[in-house]
């Protein structure tokens, strides 16, 4: 069975190994017996909800976000809104996460508009929030690990549901203890790393949600995740150690 993954702006939004999430999704889909196909979506290209099973957008610097801003607003916005309301599974990391929110205020004079799918907004902070992150999430697998590097501080609105509670690291803003945001089948997060190779249960959960959207009862295989879980354990250990000693 074909499984189509859209990779949005791969040349502009791809920091800290974010492409690894697409690779992980494609490989795990293949291991579960699906036939994955990764299709890139560049500026100027549109899509319909039925075109894909899952969509990914990674992170980018402020410069890259400004470069795609016009296309995001004028070309991709309605495509994404239709896809979200049709329950397409979307994973958005860092800058991609910010752009799905209401806006990113770069400074007093500059605001990068988002498309408001997520009830979140972001303002630039005075320092970068960098390091390994450990969060407690209600998604399958529970605890998620990742690496964050951002100066944008994201705040959740009243209708926003966080991806998880920060155990170690900064998360959305280093203040309220939340990380990421979930709306319908949209998952926004600051966790680079890449996120999915070290959190295989989350990767499989996204694949399952995508198939449920198609009303397909697919039998997932039991995979040998020894390497993935080992990487998870190491990242969790590093994050906890950094919390005990911020100088590490």
Image: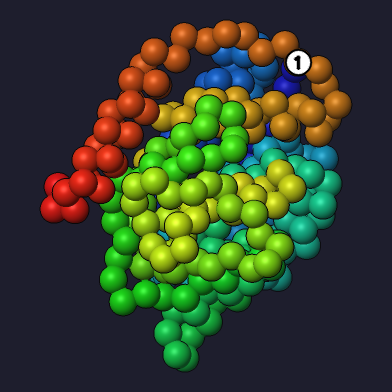
Residue closest to the far bottom: 109
When the figure is inspected, residue 226 is found, relative to residue 188, above or below; the finding is above
Q: Position of residue 8 (x, y in %)?
A: 59, 50
Q: Residue at the location (86% across, 26% down)?
A: 215
Q: Residue at the location (49% across, 79% down)?
A: 105
- The quarter holding residue 26 reads top right
Q: Residue at the location (66% across, 18% down)?
A: 35
From where the camera sits, is residue 209 visible? yes
Q: Position of residue 67 (x, y in %)?
A: 50, 69
Q: Which residue is mark 1?
A: 218
18 lies left or right of 70: left
Q: Residue at the location (72% across, 11% down)?
A: 219
Q: Position of residue 44 (x, y in %)?
A: 66, 60
- The quarter holding residue 56 reads top right
Which scheme is used to colour this image of the protein?
A: rainbow
Q: Residues within 10 Å of mark 1 (few under 14, many from 20)?
A: some
167 lies left or right of 242: right
When the figure is inspected, residue 79 is found, relative to residue 53, above or below; the finding is below
Residue closest to the far right: 215
Q: How many marks?
A: 1
Task: Classify mark 1: helix, strand or loop.
Answer: loop
Q: Quadrant of the N terminus?
A: top right
Q: Position of residue 206 (x, y in %)?
A: 64, 33
Seen from the viewer's position, the closer of residues 135 and 202 is 135
From where the camera sits, is residue 203 visible? no
Residue closest to the far left: 247
């Amino acid at each position: 069975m074909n499984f189509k993954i859209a990779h949005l702006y791969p040349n502009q939004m791809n920091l800290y190994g974010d492409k690894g999430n697409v690779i992980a999704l494609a490989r795990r889909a293949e291991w579960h017996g699906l036939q994955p196909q990764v299709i890139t979506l560049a500026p100027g290209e549109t899509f319909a909800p039925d075109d894909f099973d899952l969509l990914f957008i990674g992170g980018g610097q402020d410069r890259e976000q400004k470069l795609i801003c016009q296309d995001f607003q004028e070309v991709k916005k309605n495509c994404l809104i239709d896809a979200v309301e049709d329950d397409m599974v979307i994973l958005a990391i860092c800058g991609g996460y910010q752009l799905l929110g209401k806006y990113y205020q770069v400074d007093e004079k500059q605001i990068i508009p988002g498309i408001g799918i997520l009830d979140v907004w972001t303002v630039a902070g005075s320092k970068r929030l960098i390091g390994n992150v450990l969060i407690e999430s209600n998604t399958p697998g529970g605890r998620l690990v990742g690496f964050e590097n951002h100066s944008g501080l994201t705040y959740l609105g009243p209708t926003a549901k966080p991806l998880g509670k920060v155990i170690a690291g900064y998360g959305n803003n280093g203040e309220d203890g939340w990380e990421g945001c979930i709306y319908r089948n949209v998952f926004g997060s600051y966790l680079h790393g890449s996120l999915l190779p070290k959190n295989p249960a989350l990767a499989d959960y996204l694949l399952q949600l995508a198939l449920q959207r198609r009303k397909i009862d697919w039998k997932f295989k039991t995979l040998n995740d020894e390497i993935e879980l080992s990487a998870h354990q190491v990242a969790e250990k590093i994050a906890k150690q950094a919390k005990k000693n911020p100088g590490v």
